[in-house]
Image (cartoon, rainbow, N blue to C red):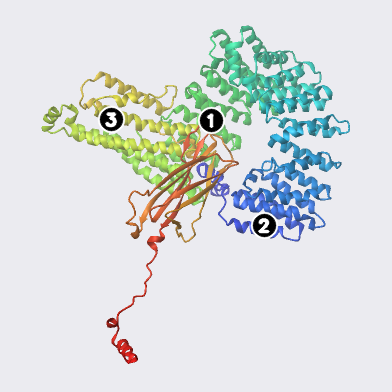
Amino acid sequence: MASQLHRRGVEFDSVTALYKETSYVDQEQDANIALSELDKGLRSIKLGVQCEAVVKFPRLFERYPFPILINSAFLKLADVFRVADAFKEGNNLLRWCILRVIQQCDRHLDKVLNVDEFVRRLYTVIHSNDSVARALTIRTLGSIASIISERKNAHHSVVNGLDSHDAVEVDAAIYAADKFSGKSKVFAANICSKIAEMIEDIATPVHLKLQLIPIMKNMYHDSSTAAKARGICLHLLSTFPAEKFVTLTLETLTHLAMRSLADVHSQIELLIHHLRTDPRNSVKLTSLKNLNLLARKSPQLWKYNSVEELLSFAITCPSFLLKWACIQVLTSLSSSFAFQMFLSRDMTVSDIQKVLEVCNICYQTQNATLSSKAIEFYTNVAVAYKKSKVCMIEVERDLIEGARLAITTQICVSIWSRESKDKQALLLCLKCLVNLVKTYQETGETFVMELTQLLESASDDNCVKLCECLAALGSINHQLIEENLGQLLQVYQSVSSKPASKCQLECCLYLGTVFFQVAAGEAIPLDVQNLITQSITKSMDDWFGYKLGRQAMRYGQFRIASEIFHNLSQHVASEHNFFWLTGLHGVCAAEACVNKSDTSTKALTSQISEMLVLYQQGLVSIKAASTSVGTMVFQCEYVRLRIWLLQTHQQLVHTCNTFRTCPPPAIATAMAVSNRHEISRVSQILNQLGKCLKEYEGLSEKFADLYQSAFDADTHTLHTILLLQQSCEVIKSCILTFIRSSHARYLQFGALSTTDKDPLTVTIQSIQRHLNSIIQSQSSEGLTHQQVDFLCQSVRRLVHTPFTYPRFFFQTLQATNIKLAISPQQLSGLDPVQVHNETQLTVKVEGIVQHGRYRDLFRKVAKVQITATSELVNRTSNSTDQKNSLTTTNNLSQSVEPHNDYFSVNFLLTFPVTGSHSVQIRADVVDENETLWKTGPSSSLSIKSYDDSITKKPVNKPVRTSFGQMPPSVASSSSSSNQ
């Protein structure tokens, strides 16, 4: 087992996902050295060495994506492109390699600083006598159209290339014309008529005409050009009725309408017209594909009469392929908000009957692909009907029952087949099942019962899919599975007894997750725990055991998770994996100390004390598992805040015990009467409660900071952090309500949503309701025993509520990293940057946004906010006479939108006070919803401000002395010479 884990390397998910997602960060090297190595290859006399050096440039750009290097590299490539004629053989091969590099690195083209020089070196080859060299140059110009979109000489070369008699040059010119028309408004307006003439010209070959038509989709820059291009394409439809011309023109018109947003409805009507009138199936299929594209991109621009046409076509069409494509369009529409508007505003009962007739196609066909697509449309209609809030109970009941029956029927049919189309149909039906249960949870129990019965006879592959579906239903509402839990236990025992295989382990993993979900944080029976641990031991697969232990932690089953991680820690080979598993074992052992059966205050304090000891041990191990690649920042902070929360709970319980055991002194009553505040009678307890209040406030702020730092976290992780913050806020609200005479603070604290079934949410809501009842029942102003008992009871309930560890604690699905480069750069000797106190320092901050495997999975980077702050560290001794009113700090901030993941900002900083200053540069992320995320990184810069008038040393002027002040020897010699 140790060798197995050793082969996997860092495969434990917290460590694995963290390491794998950040593997794109290479070791820092000197970019100039890397560029010089490639430059040596470019200067080689061997063509193979040159080509090898050229193809290495994209990798160099990914490692050092800053303008100063990219500008130099592209100029070198352009120079090689220009002088390649010096070689008798292979010159165009080298140019072709450079062209491919430019096409591959188009996202870095905007970082070329010397665009004029770059273009000049490339453009010299356009006058070559070699047509292939000219063609490569034209293609290269088209590839860099994003930075030279308005260059007239490039436009002229492309137009000349279209008139060339060489086929290679014409193909290159068509490619460049397509690129330039998408970037330049002027070029698109000028080339539109030229393209139309070439298409209509009899001398133009057919294959060239087919290449020219797609250029029209780029004529969207203004309404007049778009209307002209659309008119030309409509004329082509009547002039060239051939199948290839019609299909290509329809696709071009669709893309033009989507980009210009001017003729979307007209394009929908045109496509439906060809769908009805054109007898060719290929044209019909192309029309449906384009309608589906418009349904996904612009569903709000559809009208109901177009939907009616599609419904009628789906009912009457005899072709299976066309019927499937038509239902695909309807499925895309039904999943949008526009279809909800149709249901609530345009559709009548008869129209809904037509919709149901299309849905019933799933019963009329034996093809699994068409049937599953009709079921998806059926499910979307039922969900949309619920969201549209139309009050027709009979229709809704028919939709629910019909969709449920259709899904069940197709699952039963597909689960026995081994064909690929049936497997795909089964997956689609299971997704529809989950979507239907999310909207209509009353259908869940029936589905769970049917899936459980199918588990006993399904094949291994299909059994995995059914178990995954059950786990998805359990995440929606675990109460749906409780009635079938006994049968699922029998299935688990049967599956775990089979020889270990991939499907068998996945089934056990999903079923184990279902058991954890149903338990809802309560202790699992001992026999079930033994069954799960035995399955891990029998499988001899530690990776399976780790994933099962991770699921146990996510659903609050810490006792079994502690045992799993303890066993796994004995099987690992690497040091950081050992510390990670040991830390997880300590965390789980700490949470397993919670004993809900003993409700005494003494037992509560002893449990918290024991938890704190184990938590500290676990935190030390998790910190030891950190490496330079996987820093475990979120994990350590999450555990540290849990420790802080337990310590604060313990402090509040001790304060409440003090109130019970230490009554106020005799003079306290007289002081309360004199102050006219009854609550001042327990002033000592009030001071202790005030300290607890500050602790909860600090915890709430720290949870908010943790939330803002988790940009890459999934939504459930963020929701969990918010709940933990709310738990601090609700205790803080209780304390404020009891120690203040007015209850304004409590009234400002809103209640949580009641739709969430999370145990922590239920606990917080219960505390809020209980607090409200105490306020309404008690009219006295002083602190009472009932209120103190309520505080202890609230702490006990929060401690006994299962503490969950979310997915982001183990897995990083989305990884976003910002890399900064700051100039002026500080030398390696850490000598500060010298700045005159009367001048301003320009600080340039460049950066790139690096992404992991899954980009923009949960949220995307819309802006990067750069903040520059400075403060005076040490004032020079000669600057004491400077004015005290001079500012010693800078605080500037700028937001910039990354372009191709690159951004750059400049700051002007002043340092009027001489001395040492520290400049802090911090980068934060703003997402598409304008939410600020404090992701970092931050960098520092040391500045030394000086003043020439202060630091300048005084010059010693010669002083003329009198005769009497001279030394005796000098005076005597002077007198003798005078005689």
Above or below, 33 relative to 132: below
Q: Nearer the viewer, mark 2 or mark 3?
A: 2
State left or right for residue 215 relative to residue 107. right
Instruction: Give me the disc on residue 735.
Output: 3
Residue 387 picture location, percent across and down:
54, 17
**Residue nearer the viewer, 711 or 428:** 711
Mark number displayed over residue 492: 1
* Res. 38 mark: 2
Circles 2, 1 touching at the beta carbon (< 8 Å): no
Q: What amino acid is labelled 1 in the image? A: Tyr
State the image coordinates of residue 120 (x, y, percent, origin top left): 72, 50
Q: Is residue 663 visible?
A: yes
Q: Residue 443: where, in percent of width, then height?
A: 54, 17
Image x and y of residue 624, in percent: 44, 50
Q: Amino acid at mark 3?
A: Ile
Above-or-below relation of 185 to 125: above
Asked whether, in this view, residue 776 is left or right of residue 801, the answer is left
- In this view of the protein, which residue sits in the foreground, 160 or 207? 160
User: Element type at marker 3?
Assistant: helix
Which label lies toward us, 1 or 3?
3
